[in-house]
Image (tube, rainbow, N blue to C red):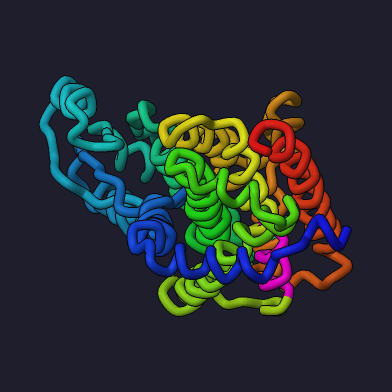
Amino acid sequence: MKALFRGFAAIVYKEFIVVLRDRTTLFFMFFPPLLQIIAFGFALDNDPKHLRLLLYDEDRTRESRALVEAFVNTMSFRLVGEVHSAAELASALRAGQATAGLQIPPDFSRRLRAGRNAQVQVLIDGSNSTPALQALNTAMGVAFRRSLGTLLAQSGRRDLPVEVRPQILYNPAMKSPNFFVPGVIGIALQIATMISTALSVVRERERGTLEQLLVSPMGKGALMLGKLTPYLFIAMVMAGVLVAVLHFVFFIPIAGSLWALAVGSLAYIFALLCLGLLISTVAQNHMQALQISMAFMLPTIFFSGFIFPRETLPWIFYAISTVLPATYYIELVRGVVLRGALFSEYVNALVALVLIGLTLFAVCTMRFRRTIG
């Protein structure tokens, strides 16, 4: 064991000098993650507001205007114009000029005053399912609330027979950044650390300096850990910066322990660095290292729970998600930041990250000795 890690301090010192002098590596380790967390945090939103609404009002009465105001007051719609025929409304939706169209028939107010069923039509552009679903739910909600108010007024009741009082925990305002930004930290760290480590070893092999290290008396474990340590240090600084952006830019309160975030980030980054080292034992040049690294990114983005709930994935993709480090890190960060999870509640994710890291390190050691040594 002692021989395996002989020369660790020397290789760490050498790698720190190399990394700190490599401004390109430092730039790509810091700038893209910052850009990603700001861009994704502001851009990803499952609750679109102010959807464009076109109006075709054939009734033009006080009741029809009240209905339009009810749609606009939900903040989900903004009235962008008025058309004068059903064909014009359909044409505008087909041209993408609005997300939804509200058509009020000429007998709307007359039927409403007579206590009869008054129908309006809402045409929704379903080519984008997210705003379409928001428009559908809002339209149904407006109709339900107005119908309920009318029925209560007619019956003389002042309260509902059955009333549900929901309470949203941990994210009461249901802000999308509160859900996405913790996940972006995991994705950004993976891009910065895995690619940097993979390129570092491949670059040394292409320059021929790796062979000089291999003929030195240092152990293989010392060489690998020595190469990982500077990147581990820099990535931990990066993780701290990203958590600060989460709290001070997106104003997301951190309900749990910062130490839990630090320990989870350390285990996650170590696993990612080992994965990058494993890629370097397979790739023969820069291009191959980048391509293999990107091959790991797509499953991470789609299967880790970053965007889609894992429970809705088909079983084969769910199985893939169980071996991705980002799956457990995103689960841990969301638990600690949003729900204030205690140690007993995130320990499973932490243990999974440690096991993945140690397994990857053991595999790297064997492959490093076989393919490079």
Q: Residue at x 52, y 69 (%)?
A: 16
> In this rendering, is residue 244 above or below 317?
below
Q: Residue at x 75, y 48 (%)?
A: 361
Q: Is residue 116 visible?
A: no
> In this rendering, is residue 339 above or below 350?
below
Residue 88 x/y as whole percent: 13, 25
Q: Is residue 230 left or right of residue 130?
A: right
Residue 111 x/y as whole percent: 36, 37
What is the quadrant of residue 49 in the picture? bottom left
Residue 303 x/y as whole percent: 63, 37
Q: Does 16 appear in magenta?
A: no
Q: Is residue 176 left or right of residue 87?
A: right
Q: Is residue 283 left or right of residue 344?
A: left
In the rendered view of the protein, which quadrant contains the N terminus? bottom right
Q: Residue at x 40, y 63 (%)?
A: 26
Residue 170 x/y as whole percent: 66, 68
197 or 16: nearer the viewer: 16
Question: Magenta: predominant secondary structure element?
Answer: helix
Q: Residue at x 60, y 51 (%)?
A: 213
335 or 64: nearer the viewer: 335
Magenta stretch in the rendered image: 260-268
In the rendered view of the protein, which quadrant contains the C terminus? top right
Q: Is residue 11 visible?
A: yes
370 or 354: nearer the viewer: 370
Seen from this angle, which residue lies furthest left?
84
312 or 317: nearer the viewer: 317
